[in-house]
Image (tube, rainbow, N blue to C red):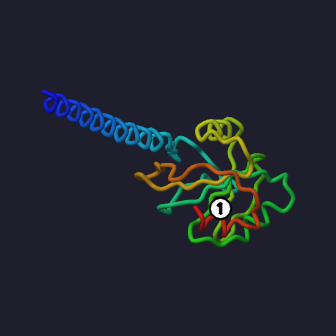
């Protein structure tokens, strides 16, 4: 009888271990699925941004998006000179007009458009950085977490870490 009892305890512990293992795998899958769904979409047909006076139309498959403040001294010049492996969309909080450079497209929008953008991506800091990639046509999906950019001079080093 003792033999039978030991076997049933072993079976019960094996069953519980299997259950908890499966529950942990399901929880991890749900968490990563939730984190992925947290990433937002932006359709450039709905979000209107301007390059000088022209409406911006995206052409690249991927972009680095930098939300910054033109009131911070030297920020626009630093952004204009940066050359990274992806094109940069620099969106100004204060909507200052600036000539785009070879690797950086300076964008601006009306107050309503800027607020809609800030709310969509939950941007709380300036400058902030994240990546987007084309989903189809003018629809892009956020492809990274939004990070605070501490130092524009260190941007290329930080991009390589992401």
Quadrant containing the C terminus is bottom right
Residue 84 relative to residue 27: left or right: right
Q: Nearer the viewer, residue 9 or 116?
A: 9
At numbered mark 1, what does the secondary structure look like: helix, strand or loop? Answer: strand
Few, some or many residues within 10 Å of mark 1 (<14, 14–19, 20+): many
Question: Looking at the picture, how far across and down is residue 4, in whole percent?
Answer: 13, 30
Q: Residue furthest front?
A: 2
As drawn, 120 above or below 66: above
Question: Looking at the picture, how far across and down is residue 56, in whole percent?
Answer: 59, 54
Residue 33 relative to residue 95: left or right: left
Question: Looking at the picture, how far across and down is residue 86, in whole percent?
Answer: 56, 67
Q: Nearer the viewer, residue 122 or 41?
A: 122
Q: Quadrant of residue 48?
A: top right
Q: Residue furthest right?
A: 73
As drawn, 144 above or below 102: above
Quadrant containing the N terminus is top left
Give the residue pinned by disc 1.
Answer: 105
As drawn, 150 above or below 123: below
Residue 121 relative to residue 21: left or right: right
Q: Quadrant of residue 76?
A: bottom right
Q: Quadrant of residue 149?
A: bottom right
As drawn, 27 above or below 158: above
Question: Looking at the picture, how far across and down is residue 122, in whole percent?
Answer: 63, 39
The count of marks equals: 1
């Amino acid at each position: 009888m003792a033999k039978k009892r030991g076997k049933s305890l072993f079976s019960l512990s094996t069953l519980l271990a299997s259950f908890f293992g499966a529950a942990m795998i399901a929880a991890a899958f749900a968490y990563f699925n939730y984190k992925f769904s947290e990433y937002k979409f932006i359709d450039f047909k709905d979000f209107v941004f301007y390059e000088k006076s022209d409406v911006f139309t995206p052409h690249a498959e991927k972009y680095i998006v930098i939300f910054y403040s033109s009131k911070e001294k030297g920020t626009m010049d630093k952004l204009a000179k940066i050359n990274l492996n992806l094109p940069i969309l620099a969106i100004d909080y204060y909507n200052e007009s600036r000539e785009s450079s070879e690797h950086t497209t300076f964008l601006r929008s009306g107050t309503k458009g800027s607020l809609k953008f800030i709310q969509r991506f939950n941007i709380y800091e300036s400058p902030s950085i994240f990546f987007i990639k084309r989903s189809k046509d003018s629809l892009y999906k956020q492809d990274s977490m939004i990070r605070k950019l501490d130092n524009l001079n260190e941007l290329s080093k930080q991009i390589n870490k992401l």
